[in-house]
Each structure stands twice: as structure tokens, then as C-alpha cells.
Image (spheres, helix red, strand yellow):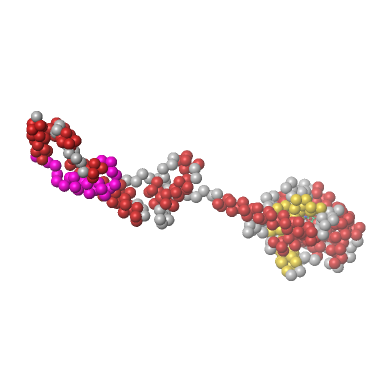
Amino acid sequence: MKKIIISIDGHSACGKSTLAKALANELNYGYIDTGAMYRAVTFYFLENRVNIQKTAEMEKALKRINITFKSTVGGNRTYLNGKDVEDVIRKMFVSKNVSHVAAISPVRKMVVKQQIEMGKLKGIVMEGRDIGTVVFPKAELKIFLTADEDVRTNRRYDELIKRGQKVSIKSIKENLRERDHIDSTRKDSPLRKASEAVLIDNSNITPKEQLAMVLALSIERIRTLSIADKKLVATKPKPEPQKNTRPTASKRTNQPAPQNQRAPQKKTPQNQPNKKSAVQDTKPTPQKKSNQPIAKSQNSAQQSFLKIQSDEKPAERKTKITPKQKAKQPAKKVVQQKTKPTPAAKKKPNKPAPKVQKNEQKKVTPKPIGETSTEAKAKKVRTKRTNKK
Ligand code: DC
């Protein structure tokens, strides 16, 4: 089955992670939380006191950052230079700074490069803010999620409380509002919906319903693309096997040439290779004709017909008379008229039956008709004429 890239972008705390993880699980795809990458960079800068106002210092620090993910039973975990930072990057001190760090172009450049690498093999669900617009603008399926601000605030509150953090609804609401504003208004890769992305407002639907919707969309997309791929393979032009076929070049390209070529093949008892059908298509010389693998009965019938033809030719040559002979034989016609021809002789000129012809020829022309016998006949005729007179 074809593997695709599915991008899930949207506002903060709109349930992107929940949906992306579940979808990746259903499709047996990889899952990448790109927000975690910006959070990891932010944590590194804070921990190492990197001054983001000093570009050179910041770029030097970026080269020392390596972010990886590990899939565990409890879910994906984010690693920064080999250290598990999954819990710490979700803390409020990181959330308050991450949108500022994520707006810095060299940071985005480094993170996006890694994301493109991660999606190279496809079969991935990637969630973030710019996946469908910048990271994978050719993603096969794009989803854009949103929800009411209050709904999102409550969801984030529940999530952080579960993680054991002490937070207030008010601080979360302010943080979400501020991050959405910075993310949507920054110069580099602002948060926005890709024109072809499917917009889902999940304020009033359960995560299960949302998953069912997106899963159906994904399966349909994968199916459609798989069919399109198969069609593409099927319509790929095959190398033309025969060059000596009769149709002209234009006919060969426009016409379903294989039909022309296949027809004679089907008539043969065995499935003949193309090479042989090409021979059939070309005008056969007698030599080629005799080499044709035709059916046994057909073959013997044809051979006997050919034999008869060859038997016939010398006989025809023998009965041919020269103009000189013709002049000497005016009475022959009369004799012939008078002589009662045998039924076989009568049939001779019209009857196509080879056997009869063959026998007849043997009968009628048992001896070669020479000059002397012609003269003798002429004499006989002349004698008969004088007798009559
Ligand atoms: O998805 P999140 O809340 O963990 O993301 C943290 C921040 O990272 C968010 O404020 C915006 C930023 N971000 C981004 O700019 N581009 C992404 N693709 C993902 C996240």
C-alpha cells in the first residue's frame, strides 16, 4: 500500500497531538511532534543561557543541538543530545518562551531541515504549524485543526494537571492567546491553513469522532493514490517488440497495434512468440511459407496442393504448341469436335479437384507429345479430309 505524508497543523492546544498519535497508530505510521523540537531548542537556549539577540552565538549553539525521538509504550519521548527532555519541555517556563524562539529564522531553518529528513521515507504523520505550508507543501493529506479558545484552554489545563504541574486556567488562556498571536504574525512561516487542507473545528466532537473522520480521509487518499500509481505503471509505454510489422508508423502509434499482431497468433495451435507473428505479418516468400508452423492437417493439405501445382506445370508446358505447330493443326479442332471426349476429359478445364486433375494429367499426357506425333496427327486429319471429299 502506498505510504503518504499527513500534515496536521493548527492552533495551540487544539488536540493536534492526540489526533496525530492515534492516526499514526491506526495507520502504523511514524509520528513527529514538531512543536517538541522547538521546545527542545528553547530549553537548550534557556539552560545554556544562549543570548538569542546575538545571532552568531545563537547559530553556534544551534550546531550543538541534536534532537531525536524514541517511541515507548507510554508514547513518543523527545531527546536532546541523548537526554530525555520530554517532561521538562512541557513546563510553563518553556511554553512562555517557545514562540519567540520559534520565530527566529536560523532556528526554523535547522529544525525544518531535520523534519524533511524525518519524512523522507513517507508513512508519517507530522503535526505543527507550518507542515502543510512549508515543510511538506506536497503532503498527500493536509488537516488543519481548530477549536474555541475556552475549549482549548480547558484541554491544556487538564493535560498539565495530569502531568503534575501546578497551573491556573487564567495563565494558560493568556499563554495560548499570546502564542497564537506570535505564531500567526511572525514573518517566517506563519501559522496559516494551507489552501487544500481540510479544516476541522473539533470544539464539539470527541477525539474518537475526530479520529474516525481523519482516518476515513486518510484511507481514501491512500487508496486513490495507490490506484493512480497502478494506472501509471500500466500505461507506461512498453518497448515495441516488432519492427517489421505492416502498419505505417502513424498507424502503429495510434492504433491498438497489438490487436493486429495478436490476431494471427491466436489462429495458430500453439502460442507463438512475437517473432513468429511478425513473420506472419510480413508477406511470406515461398520459403517462409513452407516454414510456417501451421496445423498438421492444414500443412499436409497445403503440401499436397503445392505438389499438384508442381505436377501440373510440366504437363502444361508439354501441351503448349508453337505457332508453327498451330499452323499445321487447323484440322485438329474438327477432329476434337468429332471425337467424343471422355467425362474426365470434359471436366478437366473446370474441375479444381486436385486428385482428379492429377489422375487426368497422368492419363492424358502419358507420353511427351513430340514433333513427330503432331505431324502424324496432322497427316491423319488431312487423310480423313480427302476421304470425305
Ligand atoms: O505544538 P506546541 O504547542 O508544542 O508548539 C510549541 C511552539 O512551537 C508553538 O508556540 C509554535 C512553535 N511551533 C512552530 O512554530 N512550528 C511548528 N511546526 C511547531 C511548533
Q: Residue furthest bottom?
A: 73
Observer-nearest of 26 and 283: 283
Instruction: Pinpoint residue 132: horizontal percent, then vertical percent.
Output: 72, 51
Work out whether residue 190 can be spotted. Answer: no
Left-right relation of 272 to 170: left
**Image point (72%, 49%), residue name:** 133
Residue 365 within the segment the image draws in magenta: yes
Query: Disc count in the image?
Result: 0
Q: Residue furthest top?
A: 389
> Can the viewer see residue 251 in this picture?
yes
Percent coordinates x, y for residue 83 in the rendering: 74, 67
On the image, which quarter does residue 346 sit in? top left
Residue 263: x and y, percent? 44, 49
Q: Within the image, what quadrant is residue 350 found in?
A: top left
- Which residue is depicted at the point 75% across and 62% down? 22
Q: Is residue 41 magenta?
A: no
Q: Quadrant of residue 82?
A: bottom right
Instruction: Tell me which segment is drawn in magenta.
Output: 348-372
Given residues 12 and 288, the one toward you in this image is 288
Foreground of the two, 307 or 173: 307
Report x, y in % for residue 108.
73, 53
Quadrant where the C terminus is found in the figure:
top left
Residue 163 horizontal side relative to residue 291, left or right: right
Q: Residue furthest front?
A: 388
Residue 321, above or below 290: above
Which residue is at a point 80% across and 63% down the rendered structure image?
A: 89
The residue lying toward the viewer, choosing from 88 and 59, is 88
Image check: 241 left or right of 210? left
Quadrant for ligand 1 reads bottom right
Q: Quadrant of the N terminus?
A: bottom right
Q: Tell me what residue is drawn at x 69 percent, y 55 percent.
A: 220
